[in-house]
Image (cartoon, rainbow, N blue to C red):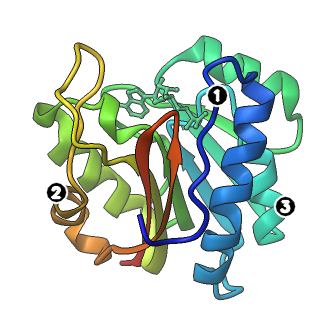
């Protein structure tokens, strides 16, 4: 891929090992995109909060995890009594306009169908403050779509997130699929 390490994961790797691997691949890249002004980060589509706590530590501030599935938020809260977790409903994130300094979106957009993209990106734009940072980690493999996943190109993600002027800051391979790390500012 021409950026950073390219390492393949084995299929029998545990969730903890995968998370540790992803952190090793992603955190050094996104660290370079931070400018020290980021004190509140939104983890959009946080799931069980695999990265939320570590992201708060990385910025030396706090994180808000947001997800539409309550059971996942409950699991996230159990593992992290410090940061806040909020429920997304009807693609509405229950936080104020321009209230976050950075948004992290890791392996979420591929699960979102084309019909919902505009509403979601508008919502992300609404909650991010001017000059706020977008950190997008997404699968950009050239593969056919499945029932649950839409594979999009790097160029397509740059078009979808035009408000953040994303550039490709890095990438790695995960189980033979191409993951791209995009960063950009509103
Ligand atoms: C593959 S998981 C990734 C979770 C987390 N980002 C991680 O890396 O562990 C995809 C997540 O996106 C969430 N999700 C699905 N549709 C969403 C939507 N419309 N808005 C926000 N999150 C959504 C799912 O509930 C799930 O937690």
From this view, report whether residue 183 is shown above or below residue 22.
below
Identify which residue, 160 or 181, lies in the foreground.
181
Closer to the camera: disc 2 or disc 3? 2
Give the image location of residue 154, x and y in percent.
Answer: 25, 60
Q: Residues within 10 Å of mark 3 (few under 14, many from 20)?
A: few
From this view, report whether residue 186 is shown above or below residue 19.
below
- Residue 55 visible in image: yes
Q: Which residue is mark 2?
A: 156
Label 2 residue SS: helix
From this view, report whether residue 77 is shown above or below residue 128.
above
Closer to the camera: disc 1 or disc 3? 1
Where's the N terminus, which quadrant? bottom left
- Horizontally, residue 10 falls left or right of residue 124, namely right
Q: CA distance from mark 2 to mark 3?
A: 31 Å
Check residue 31 in the rendering and tell me which mark sits there, or answer none: none
- Which of the two labelled residues, at mark 2 and mark 1, occupies the earlier sequence position? 1
Discs 1, 3 touching: Cβ within 8 Å = no
Residue at image point 83% right, 70% down: 60
Where's the C terminus, which quadrant? bottom left
Q: Which residue is mark 3?
A: 57
- Residue 100 visible in image: no
- Which of the two labelled residues, at mark 2 and mark 3, occupies the earlier sequence position? 3
Identify which residue, 77 or 1, lies in the foreground.
1
Residue at image point 28% right, 44% down: 120
Q: Quadrant of residue 52?
A: top right
Q: Which residue is mark 1?
A: 10
Q: Quadrant of residue 33?
A: bottom right
Give the image location of residue 82, x and y in percent.
Answer: 87, 43
Give the image location of residue 92, x and y in percent.
Answer: 36, 37
Q: CA distance from mark 1 to mark 3?
A: 29 Å
Residue at image point 61% right, 72% down: 29
């Amino acid at each position: 891929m021409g950026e950073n390490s390219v390492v393949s994961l084995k299929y029998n790797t545990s969730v903890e090992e995968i998370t540790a691997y992803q952190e090793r691949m992603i955190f050094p890249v996104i660290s370079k995109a931070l400018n020290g002004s980021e004190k509140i980060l939104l983890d959009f589509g946080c799931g069980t909060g695999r990265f939320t706590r570590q992201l708060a530590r990385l910025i030396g501030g706090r994180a808000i995890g947001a997800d539409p599935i309550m059971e996942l938020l409950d699991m996230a809260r159990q593992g992290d009594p410090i940061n806040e977790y909020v429920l997304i409903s009807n693609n509405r994130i229950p936080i104020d306009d321009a209230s976050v300094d950075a948004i992290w979106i890791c392996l979420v957009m591929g699960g979102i169908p084309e019909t919902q993209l505009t509403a979601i990106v508008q919502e992300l734009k609404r909650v991010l403050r001017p000059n706020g940072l977008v950190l997008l980690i997404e699968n950009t493999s050239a593969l056919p779509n499945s029932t649950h996943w839409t594979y999009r190109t790097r160029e397509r993600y740059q078009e979808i997130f035009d408000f953040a002027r994303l550039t490709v800051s890095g990438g790695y391979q995960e189980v033979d699929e191409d993951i791209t790390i995009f960063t950009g500012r509103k």
